[in-house]
Amino acid sequence: MSMSSQRAAELPLDPHEVDEPLFAPGAGGLIDYCTREGADSLRRKIEAYWKERGSDVMVTLHNVGFHPAIRAARYEIRSDLVNGLPRGRAKRAANSNDEPA
């Protein structure tokens, strides 16, 4: 199975099977993370991911207003992650890289 057909097989065909906002009607379950609902969904996923791993991260939504390139208002998420890791883990990872072998 090719990578694209494998990816397509993972997407739900029925939009009612998706519990998140769809990017566009009939888009096969693609999620628009630039809407308030989509960005909030992503925020919750990130927070839950790190909570399951014992870290509390702060993720916030920011309305950045109308963007002419996409001709719509959009939302961004911002977090206190450092290089994709919670602050304490990022420091430990940096320190372990600094130690001589």
Image (cartoon, rainbow, N blue to C red):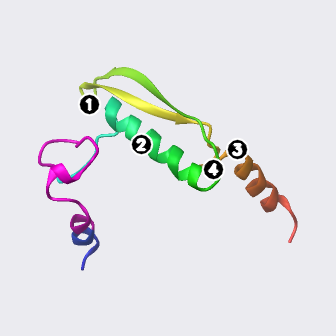
What residue is pinned by disc 2?
Answer: 42
Local secondary structure at mark 2:
helix
Compare marks 3 and 1 and give the one earlier in the sequence: 1
Residue located 26% across and 30% down the image: 70
User: Dot 1: within a 10 Å radius of its alpha carbon, few (fewer than 14), some, or many (20 or more) residues?
Assistant: few
82, 21: nearer the viewer: 21
From the viewer's perspective, is residue 55 above or below residue 6? above
The magenta-colored residue range is: 7-27
Of callouts 2 and 3, which one flags the residue occurring earlier in the amino acid sequence? Answer: 2
On screen, residue 41 versus residue 52, left or right, reads: left
Circles 3 and 4 in contact, beta carbons < 8 Å? yes
Please state if 75 lies on the left or on the right of 3 as rendered.
Answer: right
Could you say which disc has been placed on residue 87 in the image?
Answer: 3
Identify the residue position indicated by label 1 in the image: 70
Residue at 47 percent of width and 34 percent of height? 77
Q: Name the residue at 28% across, 24% down.
A: 68
SS category of the residue bearing label 1: loop
How far apart, in angstroms, are the residues tagged by discs 2 and 3? 20 Å
Query: Is mark 1 in CB contact (under 8 Å) with mark 4?
Result: no
Q: Nearer the viewer, mark 1 or mark 4?
A: 4
Label 4: few (<14), some (14–19) or many (≥20) C-alpha neighbours in 10 Å: some
The residue that label 4 is drawn on is: 85
Residue 11 lies, in percent from the top left, at 23, 60
